[in-house]
């Protein structure tokens, strides 16, 4: 009876933990969460209509479960948020790894957009990249839009090639300003903001779509995920440090080794 009681308590404990974890993952403000788990090939062709061509050709491709965004191609793709937003704040996050350095001036590779077309389309909260001063490094920046009167505000930290980076972007309708966090712990982490004047160029002043953009100057990167939402928590992604991963593996190995020794005895 004692054994059964312990087993019952153990099972109940894990059921409680499971329910708690499931509850923690329910985020009503998530608009879409994309992990690019499609067959290798063109994203537009293989995403079942979720992503569509906006401009250019290429295509923008998926390889081994990541979107390949490169200056060697020119296709921009866009995805609906499922609704329109013109008040409050809206966010997106991207987890990326650069393999080819961008140019010294770089360009932008992700943004929000309205429903206008052609020259009247607003590309809002443009996520920029350019080469760092140190060889084989990149710098990330943010720009409100093409009418903000600046080439963007860049963070000073350089990131080496083949280093996974989490980028979180916010566009705030109350200020018409865009903010960028790089590898944040939470929303109070250091960030940079483009405070230049923002002006919509078309009749639509709402946000309804999010985009990945390929263009000259951006180098090449693999994007593991792209999440959009209405709060920082909706889009937050934590990337474990290599040291943490190593410690987990070593710790698991030690546990298994200990279990093996006990069984041998």
Image (tube, helix red, strand yellow):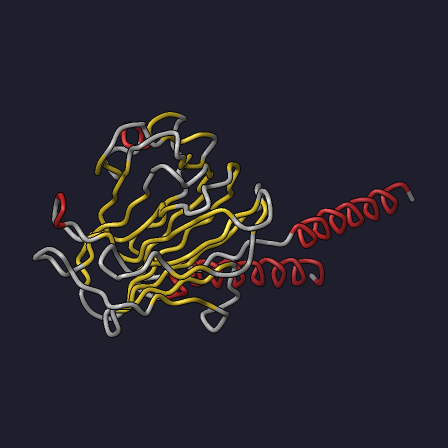
Residue at 89% across, 41% down = 264
Please, which residue is most extreme toward the left here?
203
Pick whichever, 89 or 117, lies toward us. 117
In the rendered structure, the answer to whether residue 143 lies left or right of residue 100 reads left
Count of picture labels:
0
Vertical relation: 190 (above or below) 56: below
Quarter occupied by residue 170: bottom left
Q: Quadrant of the C terminus?
A: top right
Vertical side of 144 occupied by 41: above or below: above
User: 182 left or right of 147?
Assistant: right
Q: Residue at x 45, y 70 (%)?
A: 187
Estimate the x, y position of residue 243 in percent, counting from the top left.
70, 53
Please identify the residue farthest to the right as the structure is shown.
265
| Residue 259 rendering spot, x and y as whole percentages | 81, 47
x and y, in percent, of residue 195 in the image: 32, 70
Q: Is residue 242 above or below residue 229?
A: above
Please give the name of the residue rendered at 71% of the width and 63% of the height, measured from the top-left corner: 2
Residue 189, position in %: x, y? 50, 70
- Residue occupying the point 45% across, 67% down: 191
Q: Quadrant of the N terminus?
A: bottom right
Q: Nearer the viewer, residue 45 or 8?
A: 45
């Amino acid at each position: 009876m004692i054994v059964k009681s312990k087993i019952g308590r153990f099972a109940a404990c894990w059921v409680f933990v499971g329910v708690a974890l499931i509850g923690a993952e329910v985020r009503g403000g998530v608009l879409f969460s994309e992990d690019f788990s499609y067959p290798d090939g063109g994203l537009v062709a293989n995403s079942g209509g979720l992503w569509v061509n906006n401009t250019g050709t290429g295509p923008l491709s998926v390889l081994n479960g990541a979107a390949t965004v490169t200056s060697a191609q020119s296709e921009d793709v866009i995805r609906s948020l499922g609704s329109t937003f013109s008040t409050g704040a809206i966010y997106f996050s991207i987890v990326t790894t650069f393999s080819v350095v961008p140019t010294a001036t770089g360009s932008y590779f992700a943004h929000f957009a309205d429903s206008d077309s052609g020259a009247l389309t607003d590309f809002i909260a443009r996520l920029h990249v350019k080469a760092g001063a140190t060889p084989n490094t990149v710098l990330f920046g943010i720009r409100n839009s093409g009418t903000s009167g600046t080439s963007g505000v860049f963070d000073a930290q350089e990131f080496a090639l083949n280093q996974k980076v989490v980028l979180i972007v916010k566009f705030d309708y109350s200020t018409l300003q865009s903010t960028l966090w790089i590898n944040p712990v939470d929303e109070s982490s250091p960030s940079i903001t483009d405070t230049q004047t923002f002006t919509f160029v078309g009749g639509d002043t709402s946000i309804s779509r999010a985009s990945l953009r390929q263009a000259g100057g951006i180098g090449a990167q693999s994007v593991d995920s792209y999440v959009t939402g209405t709060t920082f928590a909706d889009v937050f992604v934590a990337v474990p440090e290599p040291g943490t991963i190593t410690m987990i593996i070593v710790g698991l190995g030690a546990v298994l080794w200990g279990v093996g020794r006990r069984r041998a005895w």
